[in-house]
Amino acid sequence: MPMRRVLVLTSALLMVCLAGAPEGAASALTDQFKGDLERVLSAIEETGKNGLDAARRHEAIRAVAEPVFDWREMASRSLGVHWQARSEAERTEFVDLFRDLIQRSYITQVERYSGEPVRFTGEKVDGNLGLVNTRVVTRQSKEVPIDYRLLNRDGRWRVYDVLVEGVSLIGNFRTQFDKVIRTSGYGDLIQRLKAKGSAAQS
């Protein structure tokens, strides 16, 4: 399954936890977002200072970053029409595999981060849906728009999609997953995701 473009988009999730705090009056969404950033930044800094081995450092960062994302929402949207056909056991398995896929790329990008500045440019709230707009300044001084879609569930905002220059992370996964399922079946998709996890651990 061609995943290069998908993983490039996945790396944008890093910016959720490494962006500077937005300026001006803060809304409830901004307040929570800022708190999430500070906790993950602190975990990255502390685990680096403590000299933890790679596995323990990854686990510590994952634990702090876990509440930032709505994994079930992300997973269900990435499967699209195929989600409804899955049993609850299959859904649970897929959410776990999807979370692992994202987190592996996320942790890798955390360790590669080199301080690119990020500007918050706005936000929108419509009921339980939120959108946070940012601009990442590259080393070539190019501003790349990265927008975060969030869902408020049980009083907490969580990221469920990221758009890089207008291209949706979840939409990209959905296209890739749909192609595999229609070509060789849902079982083959699961085996490919499991294989990626095994390869990453070896």
Image: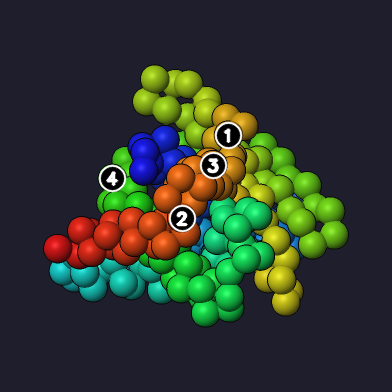
User: First in sequence: mark 3 or mark 2?
Assistant: 3
Give the distance between the C-alpha atoms of the residues marked 2 and 4, in whole angstroms: 35 Å
How many numbered discs?
4
Numbered mark located on residue 167 in the image: 1
Tell me if label 4 and label 3 are in contact, CB under 8 Å. no
Q: Which residue corresponds to mark 2?
A: 185
Tell me if label 3 and label 1 are in contact, CB under 8 Å. no
Q: Which residue corresponds to mark 4?
A: 112
Viewer-nearest of labels 4 and 3?
A: 3
Give the distance between the C-alpha atoms of the residues marked 2 and 1, in whole angstroms: 26 Å
User: First in sequence: mark 4 or mark 3?
Assistant: 4
| Amino acid at the residue labelled 4 | Arg
Q: Residue 189 appears in which quarter of the rendering?
A: bottom left
Residues packed near mark 4 inside 10 Å, few (<14), some (14 to 19) or many (20 plus) = few
Tell me if label 4 and label 1 are in contact, CB under 8 Å. no
Task: Give residue 69's position: percent from left, percent from top.
Answer: 55, 63
| Amino acid at the residue labelled 1 | Val
User: First in sequence: mark 2 or mark 4?
Assistant: 4
The N terminus: image quadrant: top left
Q: Give the color scheme: rainbow, by chain, secondary structure or one colour.
A: rainbow
Viewer-nearest of labels 3 and 1?
A: 3
User: From the viewer's perspective, is 49 left or right of 27?
Assistant: left
| Amino acid at the residue labelled 3 | Thr
Residues packed near mark 3 inside 10 Å, few (<14), some (14 to 19) or many (20 plus) = some
Residue located 60% across and 50% down the image:
161
Q: Secondary structure at mark 3?
A: helix
Viewer-nearest of labels 2 and 4?
A: 2
Numbered mark located on residue 175 in the image: 3
Residue located 49% across and 43% down the image:
179
User: From the viewer's perspective, is 22 left or right of 45?
Assistant: right
